[in-house]
Image (cartoon, rainbow, N blue to C red):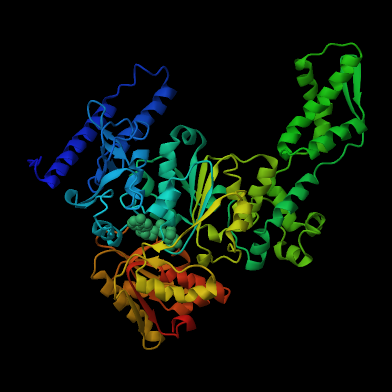
Amino acid sequence: MHAHDQTDPLARERGHLDASRSALRAMRADAEALDIRDVTANWVNAAVLERQIDDRIKSLADLAHTPLFFGRLDYLRAPGADRAEGAGGERFYIGRRHVHDADGDPMVIDWRAPVSQPFYRASKKDPMDIALRRRFGYTGGDLTAYEDEHLSDAGEAERTSALLQREIERPRVGPMRDIVATIQPEQDEIVRSGLEGSVCVQGGPGTGKTAVGLHRVAYLLYAHRERLARTGTLVIGPNASFLHYIEQVLPALGELEVKQATVGDLVAHVEVRGADDPAAALVKGDARMADVLRRALRSHVTLPTGPVVVVRGSRRWRVPAYELEEIVRELLARDIRYGAARDALPQRIAHAVLVRMEQSGEAPDDRVQDAVARNAAVKAAVKAIWPQVDPAKLVLRLLSDAEFLAAHADGVLSEEEQRAILWARPARSVRSATWSAADAVLIDEAADLVTRTHSLGHVVLDEAQDLSPMQYRAVGRRCTTGSATVLGDLAQGTTPWATRSWAEALGHLGKGDAVVEELTAGFRVPREVIAYASRLLPDIAPGLAEVDSVRESPGSLAVRRADGAGALDAACLAACEEALLREGSVGLIAADSRVPALAEALKAAGVTSLSPGEETTPDTRLTLVPASLAKGLEYDYVVLDEPAAVVDGEPDERTGLRRLYVALTRAVSGLTVVHAADLPAQLG
Ligand SMILES: Nc1ncnc2c1ncn2[C@@H]1O[C@H](COP(=O)(O)OP(=O)(O)OP(=O)(O)O)[C@@H](O)[C@H]1O
C-alpha cells in the first residue's frame, strides 16, 4: 500500500484505486466462499449454480493490466438513484465493472450504467450536468496521471485530450482490446442504442465498427441481462482467424457467455469440401433461390385422389377425397412451415373422422382423436400426401436433376443460370456429394422451410458486405424475433456478390427498418496511409466518404521499388526486419499466391513467422498474412508485398483493387509498400 497524501489529488485517486482493489478482492472472496450445498436439491442444479458462481469468480478477477477505473465524473447535482446504480452522492468512478464496498456502496460504476454515459457524451456544448470529467492515465498497472475538463466552466477552452490521443496511438500487439476508456460520442450512440431496433453501421477501415459491435453486445447484456440470457446473443465474423482476433474483448469486459461463429458454422448441415466457380456461386447466393427451394419443397405435396377409411371396431369411417383436398389446400394456404403442416395433417384428418362419429351419435373425446390420428390408414395417407422431406436431399436433387430444377426454377432462373448451378456429375448421396459453402446455405434455407430456425435475442454481423443475399437470409432467420447490429464497409466487399446497398442487404436480412449510421473518424490507419489508400475509392466505391484519421504520425508511409522480381523477396525481408526493430506487431501482407515463396524466404533468413489469428509473443511478432485473410485484422506495422499481385489475384479488377484497399489499411503506425512490378495506376 502506498501512503496517501490526502492533499495531493493523484495520491487521493491512488488511494481510491487501492481501496477499490481491496473491495474487489473481498467480493471475489465472498463469491468463492459461497456454499451451495444447502440451497440445491439435486446435482443438476448444483452443477448449473456452480458454473454460474465460477463465472462470477472469473469475472471478478482483478486483471493486472486493465485498470479498475479509467475515469471520474463529478455531477453538479446528485443524479437520481435510478441512473446511479444505487449510489448516492455526486462523484462516480467509471470502470469496466461494478465494485462495491462492504456496505454495498459503489466504489466503481460500470461503464454501461446510465450514470456513466456523460463520460462518453458530455461536451462543453452539452455538459449533461457534469462539473468535472477526469480521465486517468496508467503506466503498467499504476495510476500515474489524470486530466480534467470542467465542462460547466464556460471560461475553460475545449481541447483534445492527450491521454485519449495516447491511448488511441498506443502500438498494437496481440489480439484486439476493449476501448471502454475512449469510446467516442458517435460510437457511443450506436453502442447504447436500444435492443428493440436494428442498427447498420457503414464505416471505412479502422473507424471502430468491430469495436463498436462488441461493446454494443456488452452494453445490451448489461441493460437486458435476463432477456438476453434467455434468448442468447451471437457475434458473426468472416473466418476463424478473425474470430480469434476478437475473442478476448467480451471476456475482458466480463461477458463470458457470448457465442462467436462464422456463417459457415451456422449452416454446417453437411461437410463442405468443394468450391463453386463464381458464376455458380453468384446464382446460388441469389435470393431467388429461396423461391426455387420453396417451390421445390411444396411440390412434394400431392392432392389426395382417394378417400381415407378408418376402421374402428365394427365401424368404418370414410373421409372423402374432396374433403381431404380442402384440408390440404387450407394448410398450404397458411403461412406455416412444411413440417408443422405435416404434423397438423393427421389431427385434421382425425378431426374430420370425429365429426362423422358425432354425427352418428357417438361421443368421442380427445383420446379418440389422438388414436385416429395415429391410425395406420391416416398415417399412410399423410405419407402419400405430405411426405417427409430431407432438406439436404432436396438441394441435392435440385443440383443433380435438370428436369426437377427446371420444373421449379422456370420463370425464376434463366436457362443459363440453371446450367450454371447444375453439378457436372450428379451426386449419389448426401454424404458423398461435394458440397460447397453456398450449397450449405441452400440446405439451411430448405431446413428453415421445413422447421423454423431458432431465433436469438441479438446478432452482431461483422464484415457484412461480403455476404450473399442467401447468407443474409440465413443470418436473418437467426434473429427474426430479435434485433441485429450489421457492420460493414461497401468499399471492402471482395466477393462476387458483395453488397451494393445497405437497404437491399437489410431487406434480405429481414431488418428493412434498421437505421443506417456512418462512422468516418479513423482510429487505426495514419493520415498519410489512409490518404494513399483512398486514391482507390473512386474506382471501388464511388460516393463513399474518405476516412478522416485521428492519427497524424508523419512519415508513416514508405513505397519502395525492388530492383526486379528477384530482389522482391529480399526487399520485403529487409522491410520486415526494419519493422521488427520497433515495438509492436508486424504484418507481412501478400497476394495468396506469393505466400509460399515469402514463407520460404523468411525461413531461410531465420525469421519465425505466425499465421493470422496466432498469438504474437514478445519473441515472435511477425505474421505472414495472405491478402484473402487480412480483412478485419490490424498490425502495428505492415509490409505490403507487390500490390499488382494482390490485384491480379482476384477475378476482376474492381475486386482486386478492393482487396488491395483492405491490405493497405491494416497498419496502425506505419506501412511500407514493396514492389517490383508497376503499381496500379491509382497509386503510381
Ligand atoms: N474510440 C476508440 N478509442 C481507441 N481506439 C479505438 C476507438 N475506436 C476504434 N479504435 C481502435 O481502432 C482500431 C480499428 O477498430 P476496428 O477494428 O473496430 O475498425 P473497423 O471499422 O472494424 O475496421 P475494418 O473496416 O478494417 O474492419 C482498433 O484497434 C480499435 O481498438
Query: In the rendered view of the protein, which quadrant contains the N terminus?
Result: top left
Residue drawn at 29 percent across, 74 percent down: 554
Q: Residue furthest bottom?
A: 563
- Image location of residue 318, percent across then percent down: 91, 24
Quadrant of residue 283 within the rendered picture = bottom right
Question: Eyeballing the image, is 292 above or below 599?
Answer: above
Asked if residue 442 lies left or right of residue 200, the reply is right
Quadrant of residue 406 within the rendered picture = bottom right
Looking at the rendered structure, the number of numbered marks drawn on it comes to: 0
Asked if residue 439 lies left or right of residue 111, the reply is right
Question: Eyeballing the image, is 385 above or below 648?
Answer: above
- Image location of residue 335, percent across then percent down: 74, 39
Q: Is residue 666 visible?
A: no
- Image location of residue 478, percent across then percent down: 58, 44
Task: Classify the position of ligand 1 by quadrant: top left, top right, bottom left or bottom right.
Answer: bottom left
**Viewer-closest of 581 and 485:** 485
Question: Eyeballing the image, is 233 above or below 555?
Answer: above
Residue drawn at 37 percent across, 41 percent down: 112
**Viewer-closest of 189 and 639:** 189
Q: Can residue 480 be seen in this view?
A: yes
Query: In the rendered view of the protein, which quadrant contains the C terminus?
Result: bottom left
**Viewer-closest of 75 and 59:** 75
- Image location of residue 79, percent across then percent down: 32, 35
**Viewer-closest of 586 and 235:** 235
